[in-house]
Image: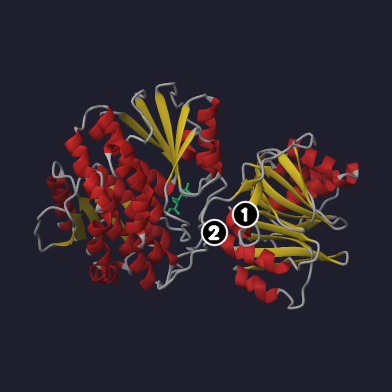
Amino acid sequence: MCGIVGSISTKTNIIPILLDGLKTLEYRGYDSAGLSYIKDGNLTINKVKGRVKDLEKNIKKDAFSNIGIAHTRWATHGKVNEINAHPHHVGKITIVHNGIIENFNKLKHKLEDKGYKFKSESDTEIATGLLDYYYNKYQSIDKAIQKFIKKVDGSYAICLILDNEDAIYVIKKDSPLIIGKGKDENYIASDVPAILKYTKNYYILEDYEYGKVTNEKITIYDKDGNIIKKELKEYQGSTRTSDKGIYEHYMLKEIMEQNTTIRKTIDPYISSINDLLKLPDLTKYERIDIIACGTAMYAGLAAKYLFEEYTNTKCEVFLASEYRYQNNFLNDKVLSIFISQSGETADTLAALKKVKENKCDSLGIVNVKESSIARNIDKVLYTEAGTEIAVASTKAYTAQVALLSTLILAHAYRKQIFKEEKIIKILEEFKNIDQILKPILENTDLYKKIADEIYEKNDIFYIGRGLDYALAMEGALKLKEISYIHSEAYAAGELKHGTISLITQGTPVFASATNKKINSKTISNLKEVISRGAKCYLITDEDFKDNSIQLIKIKKVSMFLKPILTVIPYQLIAYYTAKLKGCDIDKPRNLAKSVTVE
Ligand code: AGP
């Protein structure tokens, strides 16, 4: 997933617009950055290995242009270096690209047979060569693009400029791309936030569409070159660009604002049972499938437990990247729920396409308004976590769990499994979430103490049973993705079937025990690892005392809220551990916020 920005203007210097847009999109990938612009018929390309701020230092102070394209990269093909950075230039064509050209090898050999020589390891350079080849062959960029669309397999959002034309061309398949409409200037971006400073009005490109953008006109075509009319959208999200405020990192800010973001997400449904019943009626479905990636999938695992335990509904949870290649046993009695913070995750989008091809029902739990998943799904319920900048998801996860919990609560009521008074009691807890979370969020001295004990370790384990196993997965992912410490989640009962061989003196093992029916089993599993030298930490709402285990106490609440209370210590322990290690917490190495490639 990379960030793309383009701009063309009658008189404005668009170079600051490009750099500004890249900074907004840097969460999509930050291995390298580059831009190209044309001035008096001369093309300039500037690219660096590193961040946008490094690119900015490379741009001449007096650089001026009315047309340009820019890119911030998350490497898919080729090492992280300057030569593989975008933009790529071949012949008369310069492009920036987000996506993967899957048949790039075959195309590369064909182009080399025609005399093309390539300098980089990037599939994007091959795409540039292919466009240049067809442009020379047909002497028409439209024909070249139409041929490109026919010949290329894979995903692409491409911004293209020609050496000798005052226009930016765009091509889209699978990776998101929008065209912003301004006054005497127009913009292109992977995401609307990159151009919100300049316009709130934009067109969304759909697969196999391409466009020509000048400073006065935006024309969009289908893959055969027929002009198509598109609806001009107006951005509905908040235009306030979030800043870190008093916090050192976005991640800490986003962890701390969870008591408000959770309330914002579920407020429309928790004032009364009537409000709760505004949520979709799921009673016609015999099975609920949940499909997502990463943290969103772990939110789905928590929901699975609640669906099955409290509504007697079969619920299966799938990794989107696996789901799309499996037999999914779909029928009209199955509801497929897709969870995604960004709404742009390629694997999740591809799985959604499969459900829609099977004409089955789909429901989205999405954070970014008007995102690809939100636009393509039957019905969408938005989490109101606000823009999540830190690559490691925290407030989006708890908003997803809270929204799913209310959906499940409504389902339990409709299936007459929960009586009114029980529902009302749980809704009261939801209304009190900010007070309930406060002591957990404020217990930072304990989390810092634990971080100090573990930050130099090489292997850390997270265990749990049932809902606590889902939380162990999220806890392990939070730690490893920002501190780079190898950490693994295990079903508490499974550790002894092999992996316990890895436990040595001082190995940290985290557990949560929030289900009194099975907590004693988890405690026994902790004792098993303690007897082999492990240092154990236990998150629980039980009155429990054991000098050999560091306790992290949380308040007793219904199971519908427990995932939210339990995950916060895991989030903050991961944060303080990464801080002690001096890691780049908001932009961890190798990662990006929105994985729009497979
Ligand atoms: C979460 O901390 C990770 N950054 C990652 O696993 C993320 O949850 C996953 O890529 C799914 O993203 P989505 O919610 O935007 O679809």
Q: In this view, does 397 lie to the left or right of 556?
A: right
Q: Name the residue under label 1.
A: 200
Protein image colouring: secondary structure
Q: Count residues near mark 1 (Cα–Cα under 10 Å), then give few for <14, some for 14-19, many for 20+.
A: some
- Percent x, y of residue 427: 24, 44
Mark 1 secondary-structure assignment: loop
Quadrant hosting residue 405:
top left
Q: Is mark 1 within 8 Å of ligand 1?
A: no
Furthest-top residue in this view: 332
Quadrant hosting residue 363:
top left
Q: Is residue 244 left or right of residue 546?
A: right
Q: In the rendered structure, are the residues bearing label 1 and label 2 in contact, judged by CB atoms less than 8 Å apart?
A: yes
In the rendered image of this protein, does residue 497 appear above or below residue 509? above
Q: Is residue 111 left or right of residue 348?
A: right
User: How many numbered discs sit on the rendered protein?
Assistant: 2
In the rendered image of this protein, does residue 218 appear above or below residue 43? above
- Percent x, y of residue 218: 76, 48
Report the quarter where the C terminus lies: top right
Q: Name the residue under label 2.
A: 239
Q: Is residue 530 left or right of residue 137?
A: left
Q: Upstream in the sequence, badge 1 or badge 2?
A: 1
Residue 197 visible in the current orientation: yes
Q: Mark 2: which amino acid?
A: Thr
Q: Mark 1: which amino acid?
A: Lys
Mark 2 secondary-structure assignment: loop
| Residue at the spot 43% in from the left edge and 71% down from the top edge | 245
